[in-house]
């Protein structure tokens, strides 16, 4: 993936029960090259898996890239594009002064995203988008392989 400056990524997280066993995945495309990554945890939440998918997808890129990251998670997209700056300015507290959930994952995502020029694109889940459907299948396969 390192040779390419433009990368298209589809990420997804899945959970059986919330919390419950969960999986994450990403499909990375750079020119004609493709890479699939995935993983799973025995006890987690869907939001944690969505965040982990984006973190791991960006982490796998060896150098700074222009990234088009597609996600079906509004939590992920809005968190990284709208909420994170306010959370940081308030010392990782919400507007209601409560600790931000999944803070360590948001911090890791912020660190990885800062290495790249990322466009965060929301896609409707389970609506026939080929990249999203593929990422969904991989995230669920990761859970199957864990169990």
Image: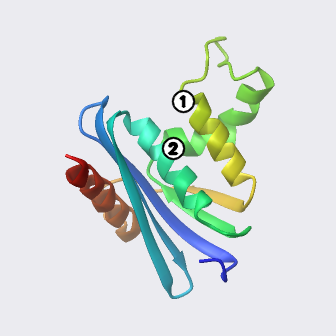
How far apart in space, not on screen, are marks 2 and 1 (Cα)? 9 Å
Looking at this view, is 110 or 121 the one in front?
Answer: 110
Identify the residue shown where x is 57% and y is 46%: 77
* Structural crowding at the residue carrying mark 2, measured as other residues with C-alpha within 10 Å and reported as few (<14), some (14–19) or many (≥20): many
Residue that extends furthest to the right in the rendered view of this protein: 89
Q: Which of the labelled discs sits on residue 41, or is there none?
A: none
Identify the residue shown where x is 72% and y is 61%: 116
Up the image or down, 82 lies above or below 7; here it is above
Asked if residue 8 lies left or right of residue 147, the reply is: right
Identify the residue shown where x is 54% and y is 24%: 101
Label 2 SS? helix
Q: Quadrant of residue 62?
A: bottom right
Figure quadrant of the N terminus: bottom right
Q: Which residue is mark 1?
A: 102
Q: Is residue 127 visible?
A: no
Q: Are marks 2 and 1 in contact (CB under 8 Å)?
A: yes
Asked if residue 50 lies left or right of residue 130, the reply is: right
Q: Which residue is mark 2?
A: 51
Q: Quadrant of residue 47?
A: top left
Residue that extends furthest to the bottom in the rendered view of this protein: 32
* Structural crowding at the residue carrying mark 1, measured as other residues with C-alpha within 10 Å and reported as few (<14), some (14–19) or many (≥20): few
Sooner in the amino-acid sequence: mark 2 or mark 1: 2
Q: Position of residue 14 (x, y in %)?
A: 33, 46
Q: Quadrant of residue 59?
A: bottom right
Looking at this view, is 119 or 141 the one in front?
Answer: 141
Label 1 SS? loop
Q: Position of residue 111 (x, y in %)?
A: 71, 47
Which color scheme did the rendering employ for the protein? rainbow
Residue that extends furthest to the top in the rendered view of this protein: 97
Identify the residue shown where x is 42% and y is 43%: 49
């Amino acid at each position: 993936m390192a040779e390419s400056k433009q990368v298209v990524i589809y990420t997804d997280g899945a959970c059986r029960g919330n919390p419950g066993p969960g999986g994450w995945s990403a499909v990375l495309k750079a020119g004609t090259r493709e890479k699939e990554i995935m993983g799973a945890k025995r006890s987690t939440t869907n939001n944690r898996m969505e965040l982990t998918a984006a973190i791991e997808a960006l982490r796998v890129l060896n150098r700074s890239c222009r990234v088009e990251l597609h996600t079906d998670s509004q939590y992920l997209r809005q968190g990284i594009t709208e909420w994170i700056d306010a959370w940081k300015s308030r010392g990782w507290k919400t507007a209601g002064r409560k600790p931000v959930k999944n803070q360590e994952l948001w911090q890791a995502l912020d660190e990885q995203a800062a290495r790249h020029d990322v466009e965060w694109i929301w896609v409707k889940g389970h609506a026939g988008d080929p990249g999203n459907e593929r990422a969904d299948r991989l995230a669920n396969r990761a859970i199957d392989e864990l169990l």
